[in-house]
Amino acid sequence: MARNKVNEQLGIIYKKIKKLLLQNKIDTYRYYKVPYIIQIEPTNYCNLECICCPVPQMSRKRGYMDFNLFKKIIDDASQIGVKQVDLFLHGEPLLHPRFIEMVAYITTKKLRVIITTNGMLFEKEKTEQLLHSGLNSNDLVLFSILGYSKEVHEMIQKRVTHEKVVNNIRYMMELRKKLNLDGPKIGVEFYIIPENEHEKNQYEEFWREIVDSVNIHPASEAWGDVKKQEAKNPPRKKSCWLLWKRMCITWDGYVTSCTSDVNGEYLLGDLNKQSIREIWNSEKMMSLKKLHKNRKFQEIPLCSHCDWDT
């Protein structure tokens, strides 16, 4: 009985600490008049079809970001104090024909760069170009690999070749060492779903001997699909701190409220016509943040049953 009482009290304390940490995250970014991070979609085309990804069923128009628009966004971000560029959203970023130029342009502005890729297109020439693009130890390249074994990796990420991705990563690590570079940091990430959860420990043990970081996360039950979220997930109960930190930008320059808005149905502005600061402080964005602050999630279909960070 006494032990149960202690565990109950510890549970209450843990919940209070989590609430305070979340509030601290929101408070940290609430006073920023610009986003800390901008997340840019070079393209929403992809060379794979992952069974856990909504991109293959995307109804939004597909295309590649115009390089002049990209430079306009980066120039704006650099001038107003944005700190980080995540150069991925939906699709495989390396499919953009000027991807390496994009990376190099960001580095000239002294902004941190994070890239997430499935790794299939990082062959030797592309890897050499990336490592000569100006990236440093503050930057990160993450390879999304959703299986330890060839069988599971290729079953989840259809059209991937397991050995090719592993060899591409090994080559990047070896070349970085040969060139005596301290960056970029190189990591792998693994989202836990029923098809791969049995490989989690083997995955971590294998990759921690090869790369700089191993990132393992629970996957959302219905990421990017509002109807599935409503069917599977309980109502959301806490604010999303990323609303105060990150701006998501589609390949054609539109700003959407979240990465889970796969089809671009919850748009906040257009960077072809507006500035980052203008959209970040717009009535639409402020109204969305106010609803989150007041926990009125039922008024936001995209958020009402989202299970991210809950």
Image (cartoon, rainbow, N blue to C red):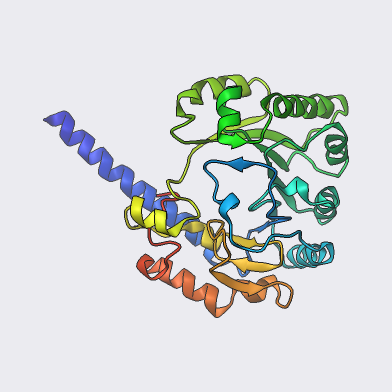
Rendering coords of residue 106 (x, y %): 80, 54
Name the residue: 45% across, 63% down.
302
Q: Is residue 145 left or right of residue 218?
A: right
In the image, 122 versus 205, the foreground residue is 122
Rendering coords of residue 203 (x, y %): 56, 24
In the image, 127 versus 132, the foreground residue is 127
Q: Is residue 203 above or below residue 276?
A: above
Q: Is any part of residue 133 visible from this angle?
A: yes
The quadrant where residue 181 appears: top right
Q: Is residue 9 above or below residue 19?
A: above
| Circle count | 0
* Quarter occupied by the N terminus: top left
Q: Is residue 279 left or right of residue 296?
A: right
Rendering coords of residue 140 (x, y %): 70, 41
Q: Is residue 146 above or below residue 111?
A: above
Q: Is residue 85 left or right of residue 265?
A: right
Name the residue: 57% across, 33% down.
146
Rendering coords of residue 115 (x, y %): 70, 45
Q: Is residue 282 above or below residue 142?
A: below
Q: Is any part of residue 148 visible from this angle?
A: no
Name the residue: 57% across, 24% down.
151
In the image, 119 versus 189, the foreground residue is 119
In the image, 140 versus 191, the foreground residue is 191
